Image (cartoon, rainbow, N blue to C red):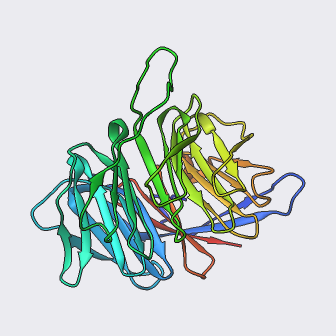
Amino acid sequence: MQFSKGLRGIVTLLLALPCVAALALETEPVRVGTAHEALFALDMDGARGLAVGTNATIFESADAGVEWSRHSVPGTSLALLGVDQRGNHAVAVGQMGAIAVRGADGWQSVSSPTEERLMAVGVNADGLAVAAGAFGALLRSTDGGRNWNMVAIEWPALDSDQQGIEPHLYDVRVTDAGVVLVAGEYGVVLRSDNGGEDWAVVHRGDASMFAIEIWDDGRGYAVGQNGVILHTRDLGVTWERQETNTKTNLFAVQSWTDGTVVVAGMREWLTSNDDGGHWVSHREGDIGTYWYTDVAAAGDTGTLLAVGQAGQVVRVATE
């Protein structure tokens, strides 16, 4: 949720969901950057937070997003577009195939097997990592992102007019059990159940999918172009489309075990408190003014964080 230019205060949005109880969100600014800054990706692992953006900038938080410290990757100014962390592993990826990992001495660049733009990365506690990007670029690491190999995918005919097309890939999730899900162009959802050694296209469609989320119990969402939301209950094997009545491009999704779901889009947000059975659209105030590209839950605090335009970090308290 975005905040007011003038008041810079807390905006309370009362969301009356049809046939279900009301959901309230309270938003407030945590960090404000400059007009030339942008933060593109956010990850929370308990109270530890990472946000990445322009000029190889990395922000870190150790207190569930209350305070953020700025870091950089030596030797590069390339924008970082994706970040993930789990256990002792933290990886960021970006333009021109840039990859950085966090070690004992801070963040360092590592060798990349591609110069394609990398949009997203996922890593699990065992150090299995997968990065994805432009023109079907897919990379795999088994040592927390320090060494990478390209993954070859035999793409089916995704477009009747273009055979052998290699879609842009926009988001990645890697579970601790080694299930990997990748979302991308042409409604593509890729799935591997053996740590990225073998892959299957489990969904395709007309709209690009920009973000994906999965839980260990099998629940998950994928969101994307033209207001498309997909829902899975079997760890991404099958996907069902949910009705949203919006054509907004949707960039990020966060859900909770109680059925609450928040989806961030281009100047429009969607919320549900019944696992997507009903959706409510919001363009009130700053939601209709700013754009945000990623959201993440801050530990067990009941708080949602969002990052995006002008290097902003916004805290969203859910009730």
Near-viewer residue (179 or 18): 179
- The reply to whether residue 3 is visible in this rendering is no
User: With respect to residue 224, does 27 lie above or below?
Assistant: below
Give the left or right position of residue 221, taking residue 117 as reference.
Answer: right
x and y percentages locating residue 300 in the rendered image: 60, 82
x and y percentages locating residue 234 in the rendered image: 70, 56
Give the left or right position of residue 251, taking residue 221 as reference.
Answer: left
| Screen quadrant of the N terminus | bottom right
- The reply to whether residue 66 is visible in this rendering is yes
Near-viewer residue (103 or 79): 103
Residue at 69% from the left image edge and 50% from the top image edge: 231
x and y percentages locating residue 16 in the rendered image: 80, 56
Residue at 24% from the left image edge and 68% from the top image edge: 146
Give the left or right position of residue 94, taking residue 283 as reference.
Answer: left
Residue at 24% from the left image edge and 53% from the top image edge: 79
- Work out which residue is located at the far left of the displayed protein and give it: 75
x and y percentages locating residue 5 in the rendered image: 45, 58
Q: How many marks?
A: 0
| Screen quadrant of the C terminus | bottom right
